Amino acid sequence: MVAVEDAPPIRASRPAPPRRIRATVGEAVPVIALLGAFFVVNDIRSWLTAQYWGDEAWVALSVRFPLTDLPVTTSSSPIGWSFLLRLVPDIDHLRVVPLGFQLLTVVAAYLLGRTLASERAQGILIGIVAGLTVLLLPVQQTRHDLKQYTADAAVAVCLLALATWTERSWSRRRLAVVVAAVGLGMLMSHTTAIVAVCVLGGLLLSVAVRRQWARTVEATVAGMVAGALVAAVYFGVSARGNSDAMRDYWDDFLPSISELPAHLSRQIKALSPMLGAPVPILAVLLVLGVLTLIRRGHAAPAIAVLLLPVAAIGLGVAGIYPLLDPRTSHFLIVVTGLVVGIGIVGLADLAVVLVRRWLPRLPQGVVAAVTCAVLLASFAAVNHRWYRLDGDEPGVWRAHQAITDIGSSTRYVAEHKGPHDLVVVSGPAWFGFTLYSDQDPLKLVAPVTGTVGWTVTMPTRADVILPRAADAPSIKDALDGILARAAKQPPGTRVWLVRAYTHPSEPVWQAALADYRVQRVTSGPEPVVVISKR
């Protein structure tokens, strides 16, 4: 008998499976489509080229100072947000940062929706609906300013998406990712402290209710670590932005318990147009959205979104955080839109059940997709005037940055003023004027009384005067002194006035100027004037 050795197996090189390639492309296409839709819906050019108005100007101005001044100049802005602005090469294009966070919000909404179904086509549909709903919210067109509110929304949606991802396949590693996201989020968004409590509370309650005690312990530990990170960032950095002036500024949005019902009713009614639908319809879709999350096995994000309004109301009544202001509550409004989008999917699920009784052969995916498409198309059609908004649409929205030209005014004066002329700048226009006086050195002055907590001086510009006046008589006294000073200069010396016309103090300036000769020298929404005695 002859022994025969076994021949070694022949290993052929295996090409990448076509199915895997198709799956990767299938996952990427919806995200690419949402990115394209983002640039269709938003007027990016207007967003990036508009001049900075008063409450943006100090944020933009902060990037002109050394990094060592960042803890002071960040003021009420999250320190991570202020740091990101410094990474933008051109100071005129700083709004690329809020643009990026708004885009992140849409992508995160898609990823959350994609996680809600294990079947790929269904998950992609839910993700697209969630992403488009967040993208098409009218309120997204109101937050093109240089503030951290788009980061608030992005962090909130990201944390909800991470909670959904963690609950889908529980592990300590995924919990660690959530905790790390909380720490990073606190650097970009103060409201991370609110959202983190709700998200980690949702994860904890979801496993505790199911009596999964090992996971309950893990979620508790994760919550404690996240809480320590929140406390470290808040008390180490963020709390410096608190002040009595800031508390007074937001007083109208810090209701007492007795004022709460009227406040909620008034603000919900005021915010309804920014959500793009009547309150009753939104309420129904919100309920459907929460039920859809639970029905699909994701109690954690459902609990989190239920805890969010409770936390917001509690903080508002306690006088800690403004309740339902369009800016500071932007994250709540966007989360509401996200849950409404999931509610649309829930409505599509109901449509599938009903259609199946009459047309059992009709593919369920087609019914769901058509239902979602009709609802989203209707929503977009009703709110079409909000899209590609340049910020100045009468009857829709008028943004400060669309009706200010402090930059043009400042540069016009710099080009046309004489060597002996004097330039008067109103208080609300000061940050804008100093920002666009980009050839002049500035000196940081801190601390000062006010919501920002710091200001600047122009040590080489003795011709620039900032009147310390708040009412018409004191403004007139200041102008009389300035005109008397100008009279001692060579003949032809002029007194220029640059001011912010959109500020609430504008009527006071108009009253003060009534006794002077006022000559407009530029056009536009905030014209420069030359003043003289009558």
Image: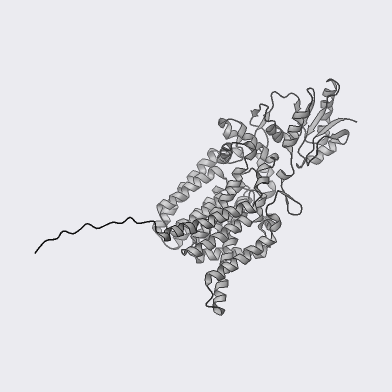
Instruction: Left or right? Give the position of 246 relative to 346.
Output: right
Total count of labels:
0
* Residue at x 87%, y 33% (from the top left corner): 516
Across and down, in percent, residue 134 comes to: 60, 56
Question: Which residue reaches farthest bottom?
Answer: 358
* Residue at x 66%, y 36% (from the top left corner): 58
Q: Quadrant of residue 271?
A: bottom right
Of residues 25 and 115, the one drawn nearer to the viewer in this rendering: 25
Q: Is residue 184 visible?
A: yes
Instruction: Left or right? Give the position of 76 relative to 222.
Output: right
Residue 157 to residue 122: above or below: above
Residue 344 to residue 184: above or below: below
Q: Is residue 324 visible?
A: no
* Residue at x 67%, y 59% (from the top left corner): 276
Instruction: Left or right? Give the position of 211 relative to 413.
Output: left
Quadrant showing the C terminus: top right
Of residues 165 and 515, the one drawn nearer to the viewer in this rendering: 165
Of residues 347 and 314, the one drawn nearer to the viewer in this rendering: 347
Residue 120 to residue 152: above or below: below
Across and down, in percent, residue 118 comes to: 46, 63
Quadrant showing the N terminus: bottom left
Question: Which residue reaches farthest right?
Answer: 534
Across and down, in percent, residue 354 comes to: 57, 75
**Colour setting:** one colour
Question: Which residue reaches farthest front?
Answer: 2
Across and down, in percent, residue 522 comes to: 80, 36
